[in-house]
Image (cartoon, grey):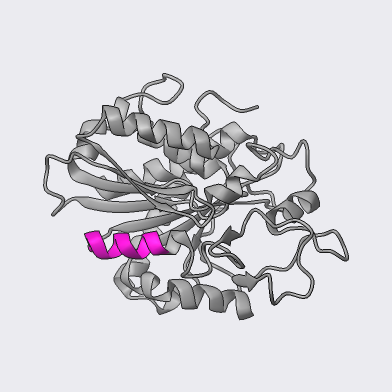
Amino acid sequence: MIEPAWISRPDEVNAQVEQWAERYPDTFAAESRRQFAGYPVWALTVTDRSIEDTGKHKAMFFKPHAHEPAPIAAQMNVINQLLTGEKLDGRPSEFDNERVLRECLLVFIPDANPEGTARAPVEAWDGSEYSNEEFWAWMRGPDPETGLMWKRVDIYDDREEEDLPTRRGIVYEQIDEHRFVEPNRHHASTLFRWIFELLDRFGDWDMLLDLHQTEFVNSEHNAMIILPCTFEELPAEVQTYSREWAEQIVAAWAEIDGCNPKPQVQPLAYGGEQRRYFVQRWGEIYRRFHKLTSEIQNNSPRTPPALQQRLNEVAIRASVERLLD
């Protein structure tokens, strides 16, 4: 069941952004980049614009994948709390709004691939309509031979693939007439183009939180924080800050009914080609900034959409509290 505070469809997001921009010009700024398919990818800045940005704590929150909608709903609800003092369902904000707006500059990229989100068959994945195998086939497209999930690649060209999926996976963003990318694995994606522009524009970022969902198949847990795959190679200060920040999020999750977070905070466990993607695409960002990845359970009745949204919001709130510590 979708809660009143849930906004994730591109048309709903666009309408809400337009409303915020009109009503809160002193604390909200909306910028967009157009996807090849025409959808706007928003970068939404929340701060007291009457105060110089120099010296503010800066954090970026973003959601790469179209098959993971709860982080969209969470970011939209958090933004509404900061701007209006209320959640989208009318309940009071959980933030110290005035202090956050005064002392922080927060940028949200609620949906890096709205074209993919628009093609999803459901607004939220709760495990009631699709098995994980079916869900994964929606994610990357069905393989023409097996009907199961097509292969995972950072980029592909439909003129060069011998066996294209029978339906394009919603995870892939179309970047021109023939090429498609996974947004967090190729620098040609709209997500990366936004990230690089924002990193250069504001410079001294305190943190970047990469919001994801996964299925936690055969796991007792339904939430976890992942450190960069190159964590052990990073400067000591980056390691210390990132681990303490990660543990703060896990502690906040542990207080939520229905959440069983993985207590260990560990680096991304990918190896081989999958690890190389992250080193090539994120390696310099890992070295320069504090970056974490959150994972909340998707497509499971154990973690319904309202809880998926809640846990993403808690991760954002704990991050903002870390900024203000």
- Residue 28, image x and y in percent? 27, 38
Q: Which of 26 and 82 is in front in this view?
A: 26
Residue at 54% in and 67% down: 268
Residue stretch in magenta: 193-203
Residue at 47% in and 38% down: 74
- Residue 159, image x and y in percent? 69, 74
Residue at 35% in and 65% down: 196
In the image: residue 5, left or right of residue 289: right
- Residue 219, image x and y in percent? 70, 53
Q: Tell me where residue 65 sits by quadrant.
A: bottom right
Looking at this rendering, what residue extends furthest in the top direction?
90
Q: Nearer the viewer, residue 171 or 264?
A: 171
Q: Is residue 236 above or below residue 205?
A: below
Give the quarter of the figure containing the N terminus: top right
Q: Is residue 180 above or below residue 30?
A: below
Q: Tell me where residue 104 sits by quadrant.
A: top left
Residue at 50% in and 42% down: 72
Residue 202 lies in the magenta stretch:
yes
Looking at this rendering, what residue extends furthest in the front direction?
177
- Dominant SS of magenta comes to helix
In the image: residue 12, left or right of residue 116: left
Looking at this rendering, what residue extends furthest in the right direction?
145
Residue 13 lies in the magenta stretch:
no
